[in-house]
Image: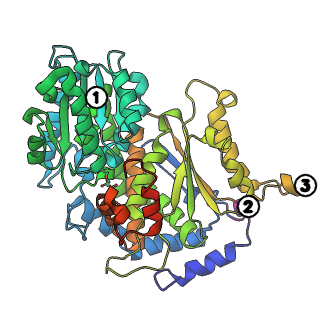
Amino acid sequence: MNQHWPESLIKEAEKLKGVRISDLFSQEADRLSYLSANACGIYIDASKNLINHVAFEELVSFAQKKRVTDAIKSMFQGNKINYTENRAVLHTLLRSSQSNVAEYEAVKSERHNVSEFAEQIRSGKTLGATGKPIKFIVNIGIGGSDLGPQLLVDAFRSSIPTTLDYEFLSDVDDEQLDYIWKRVDPEATLFILCSKSFTTWETQTNAKRVIERLKEAVGDNWNKHFAGVAVDVDAMSRFGILPQRQFKIWDFVGGRYSVWSSVNLIARILLGNKLVDEFLFGAEDMDKHFQDAPLDSNLPVLLALIQTWNIQFLNHSVFITLPYSHGLRLFPDYQQQLEMESNGKRVDRQGQPINWPTCPYIFGQLGLNAQHAFMQLVHQSDRQTYVEFIAVPSKTRNFEDDVAFRSCLAQSQALMEGTLDESVEEKRCPGNRPSTTLVLDKLTPKTLGSLVALYEHKVFVQSVLWDINAFDQFGVELGKKIATQLTSKSVEDNNVDDSTRSLIRFHSAS
Ligand code: F6P
């Protein structure tokens, strides 16, 4: 650990290493008050972590020393905090109901355009090339052009009218497109080519393959079955997307932060504009809380400090997210890109390699499924893991019948308590595993918006504490570059390593 982190925190962590989390409750009467926070319909209980009041206050002081509050202001004002790409970071502008930032008018106008188009499709007013109303919506996109819209659509899929159906096409395996083509009627399908850069290999490949098949059904009128979402309007025109179906996003919105933009077109069609606007309102609520709440009662800051404590001082490098709500089953997938593509970095703002750990490995799935899949390891292996639970209490069942909620609370308690009195070693759970529990009043478009914004801002606060840029992603370029250089001729190429060369031979075409 170098001078970046206060010596006092290092010492406090040392003191705590021999302590049991459960003992801290009897030692600190105010434990729940300083380790919990509530806003925007979300309650965070971080009291089952191996941390004490002294350490927490030191963390808050560290956040003050790192000028987190100024960094928050700077982001919302549109300063170019994405310093490696010289760009502002304004995904928050996309969900603002008002703003004096220069780009706001364009954002507002685009939100109006995409909402209008979505309503025309949703209402059946806009017909396909052969006169059929649109019934199927297929989003062609990957990463942030897929995960955000999927999370939103899946969370509220029971509200999709039976007149509409959908698919998300991100993989380039012919199997996925064959399956989709069996399910949809091309003459009644709208394909949304969703790609911020409009250059992503997988998305371009899928779009061209779809057009080839679509032409068999509607010939040159294929563009009556396409809409496009991208930064570069000219690129959409060159591709053949009709002007009135081109929806613009901006460079000041990262792909993994773009669910608030026209990237959510498929959700606007399937779920309706009112629901998606509620999602945006929820995020705006969290934006206000994030900007206004003091650091020691600020949900994104609390989550950031607790997670940073577990990473920096307790050496956790694996984080598990377990939602106990079916509508949040895709949240861990979404969170993976948001966090690991934002903070999976190793160079600080001065361009120097850092020697402290940053973003952990993050995975997860529906909590109840996880209990029957990998929670055995979390309870009984010696791996250090940190678990974040997201619970949504049932509004129709009492506590005893609320299997999901009760299981969630039981898991967090079991991780903390363990089974110390167990004499048979194979049955013993050491316990003292840290966890944080978030409780949503209810899963609504608004609370989902607040939850996603909470994690976006948590990621941002961590990047400030770590002195890194959360908004570029140069690490994804190398693989793409090598892929374009690998051809069937690479087998003769002496610059290719023997392993890759031998692997290429497995492809029948090479
Ligand atoms: O993974 C790299 C990345 O650029 C992501 O940041 C982005 O969300 C995804 O690929 C898709 O990019 P695009 O929306 O430009 O097709």
Q: Residues within 10 Å of mark 2 (few under 14, many from 20)?
A: few
Secondary element type, mark 2: helix
In terms of depth relative to the viewer, which is nearer, 288 or 328? 328
* Rendered image: mark on residue 424: 3
- Residue indicated by mark 2: 26
Helix, strand or loop status at disc 3: loop
- Residue found at the far front of this picture: 492
Tag 2–tag 3 contact (CB < 8 Å)? no
Quarter occupied by residue 472:
bottom left
Q: Residue at point 9% right, 33% down?
A: 244
Q: CA distance from mark 2 to mark 3?
A: 28 Å
Q: Is residue 130 left or right of residue 442?
A: left
* Labels 1, 3: front one: 3
Spatial CA distance of label 1 from label 2 is 48 Å
Residue 287: where, in percent of width, then height? 33, 51
261 is higher (above) or lower (below) than 426: above
- Residue under circle 1? 274
Regarding mark 1 in the picture, which secondary structure is present there? helix
Confirm whether residue 404 shows in the render. Answer: yes
Circles 1, 3 touching at the beta carbon (< 8 Å): no
Work out whether residue 312 or residue 238 is closer to the camera in this orientation and state it: 238
